[in-house]
Image: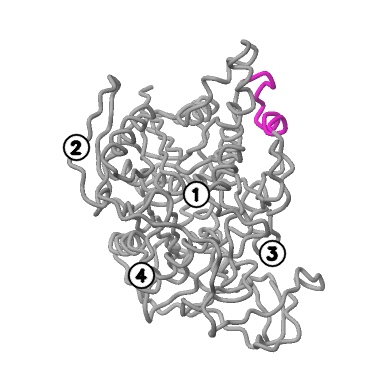
Amino acid sequence: MKDIFITGMGIISAIGRGRAATLQSLLHDRSGIATITRLDTSRREYPAGEVQLSNQEMMQRLSIPQATAITRSALMGAIAIEEALQQAQLHEKGTLRIALVNGTTVGGMDMSEKYYLDFMNNNDRNAYISTHDCGACTEAIADHFGIFTHVETISTACSSAANAILKAAELIRNNRADIVVAGGSECLTRFHLNGFSSLMILDQRPCRPFDAQRSGINLGEGAAYLVIEATETISKRPGTKKLCQLAGYANTCDAFHQTASSPTGEGARLSMTAALKNAGLAPADIDYINAHGTGTDNNDLSEGTAIVEVFRDAMPPVSSTKAYTGHATSAAGSIEAVISILALQHSFIPANRNLAIAMPELPFTPPADARPAKLRHILTNSFGFGGNDTTLIFSACNKDNTIPQPGDGTPTIQSTNNDCTVGSQRLHSRQPTTAQSATNDCTVGNQQLHSRQPTTRRLAAKHTTSRRMTTIQSPARQCLKSVPVTTPTQKMQGSCHQRHLPYTSLTQDRFQYRSHCAKNGWTTPYFMTAIWRPL
């Protein structure tokens, strides 16, 4: 089986444009969560992580004419891919088969909701009608670069970008492509801001993943992509460097509920266990878990329960970075993949920002500050509606571009003077942490970065909340053998892992499928969609 490597990555999010800006925000504890200013909405009580560039500014950076009908998701995706291609030194396709696999669910909804009345009443904005669906977003990105021989869109809600990375590895291993650019892009829209609000899972304060007093999500937007290829292709491109290995991956679907995670974390457990098996690693080999960690009551308890069940006595550090970027929904998996690779490269564990009181239901406490650590293998989770759960494992390359083997005994950085460093950079200095610590200031050199109260752990009364999520046991947990689909267009049939649910490739099939399920009282998940374009 071919070994799969990452040779380039690009990112844009609320904490900056590019890898360098992202790294500095993580090391210096700079969050992008703030009052909404760019999205035209009245719901400004909900903070979010917005990319601090207008559409016009992004078009100018990409040299796209201002009159072009293009969406925000496509623009952010193009900016991130441009950075990834530059790092991978991939400037033209030549004879290589280069694929683009893009994860998005919102697609062009931002322009559809903006110009809907024009669509209905006049012809002034009709050019934006064709930019609405998810595949159109991918096509716009592909057309901008003109190097892709295979173009594919995956839409599985918040696991979309992670599934795009998974699919990239499969395309290479099955000789369908030589190089794949994979990830996701998602812009903020009123559509999904109001949608998440209707689910009552948005927080009016900065989100607090894995905190006993967490109360919901801060939405975000952004894009991130990886350039993925095998050793055989890398050897043909002089100067190409391996950043890390995509060592393992898995996707499962427990189909527990349309939006809620299983209380037992069944899907998450299956996904992590399968990814470890795929990578040939044991739980004890994982040095850090970048959790899905949305800050909702349901997700954090479900995911935390699954992590405890999988890792037991070999529990690695766990943190969520969504308090920095916001939850970028379909793009979250690739944004957090880039963050995980940055952590591998620069030997640090990102902070679980805003953590004050650890969850009493879980035996682990995520780090409230970034900390140095020698990392070999990182596991990152992305979980979507309908129980569509995906886990990726990235492994560091040694100086000779080999992969460290399990159990090689590489030590964790230990500091003797309570100074925390990442490489040669002093990250922060503080007094030893105790429950009654008087100060917990973090500095770089003489610059104070942030000050917060020390993290405490409440072991007494169990956290309660007035908000309850109703869960439904559905016959959809059982395998559905067939679903009538009557659209004339080409379809891809398949099924999810374990508790099976079939999926089809086209948006119009989605409505027929849901209608069929509704008649039988079943719960339907989100779908994996694929659109191919031969060139």
For marks 4 and 2, the one nearer the N-term is 4
- The CA distance from mark 3 to mark 2 is 50 Å
Q: Which mark is residue 405?
A: 4
Looking at the rendered structure, the kind of residue marked 2 is Ser
Say left or right for 400 vs 232. right
Q: Which mark is residue 232?
A: none
Percent of width and height locating residue 86: 57, 41
SS at mark 4 in the image? loop
Q: Nearer the viewer, mark 4 or mark 3?
A: 3
The front one of 109 and 240 is: 109
SS at mark 1 in the image? helix
Q: Is residue 115 above or below residue 340?
A: above
Task: Please give the residue where the numbered disc 3 appears in the rendered image.
Answer: 29
Provide the residue span drawn in magenta. Answer: 55-68
Percent of width and height locating residue 486: 25, 23
Q: Which colour style is shown?
A: one colour
Q: Quadrant of the C terminus?
A: top left
The front one of 254 and 402 is: 254
